Image (cartoon, rainbow, N blue to C red):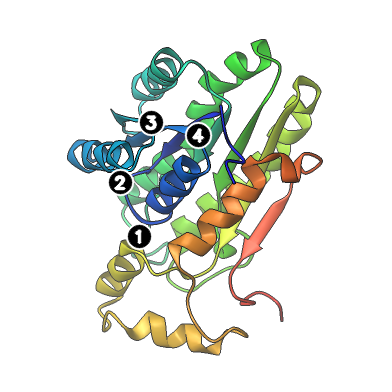
Amino acid sequence: MDVLQGKSALITGGASGIGWATTRLFAMEGAAVAIADIDREAAEKAAVAITDEGGRAIAIPCDVSSAENCKTAIEQTIRHLGGLDILFNNAGIIRRATVVEITEEEWDRAMEVNVKGVYLMCRYAIPWMTQEGGGVIINTGSGWGLVGGAKAASYCASKGAVVLLTKAMAIDHGGDNIRVNCICPGDTSTGMLIEEARQLDVRPDHLLEEALERPLGRVGTPEEIAHSVLYLASDASSYVTGTTLVVDGGGLAG
């Protein structure tokens, strides 16, 4: 369909999980993609895979909690891809713990990656988008950014912040023709879900079984979440900004 033909996109956490699924989908839809990831080797392999499939991609090693890294990622995207039309702030981490259990260092790291990373990327991307007449920003929140969850205090707090940061930026920058939206996935079959099970000391398939209680009776796939990101990145959502798109198989429906 090539709905992103001629566009350039930067995806943080773009080498795995939802980020990788979105990177591939964007490339298939005609976008040139910058894959920013803290795992340099994974980002480079992802870029090669996109190139081998006939797309255009670059790899950018990036820790989104670092202002210098974020500034460099934006600059490299613009330099090598010719611009920046779409920013997908997807990088994130989770620590399954209560406020009593989590260490101060773990709390700070969750906030640095999940919230500060969005702020920093937007801080450097928005001036360019404003100068060029507009752009699109999509942030990854969570169902737990809308409702609370057990043993996930720092994650819930950080994702709740992302949801409201999204709305604030949509208000501030709508006049610059910059749309800012947020996706809130439910449980998705990624490495993060396996990591959650490890932290909770339960079987890897335990969280998959819990998802059977959702109306659709299963977890989501990274590809399904990626299609929701594509909608928000494309002209199909040209009048959508400041919204939170829940993609969770009905988990928050009732």
Q: Nearer the viewer, residue 65 or 151?
A: 65
**Inter-mark Cα distance, 3 to 4:** 8 Å
The three-letter amino acid code for the residue at tag 1 is: Arg
Q: Is residue 120 visible?
A: yes
**Inter-mark Cα distance, 3 to 2:** 38 Å
Residue 79 placed where, x, y %?
41, 12
Q: Nearer the viewer, residue 86 or 140?
A: 86
- Looking at the rendered image, the disc whose residue lies closer to the viewer, 4 or 1, is 4
Q: Is residue 64 visible?
A: no
Res 176 → quadrant? top right
Circle 2 residue: 105
240 left or right of 128? right
Of the numbered discs 1 and 3, the one sitting upstream in the chain is: 3
Q: Secondary structure at mark 1?
A: loop
Circle 4 residue: 31
Q: Nearer the viewer, residue 8 or 215?
A: 8
- Crowding at dot 2, Cα within 10 Å, few <14 / some 14-19 / many 20+, comes out as few
The three-letter amino acid code for the residue at tag 2 is: Glu
Looking at the picture, does residue 147 appear above or below residue 218? above
Residue 112 placed where, x, y %?
41, 39
Label drawn at residue 56:
3
Looking at the picture, does residue 128 appear above or below residue 181? above
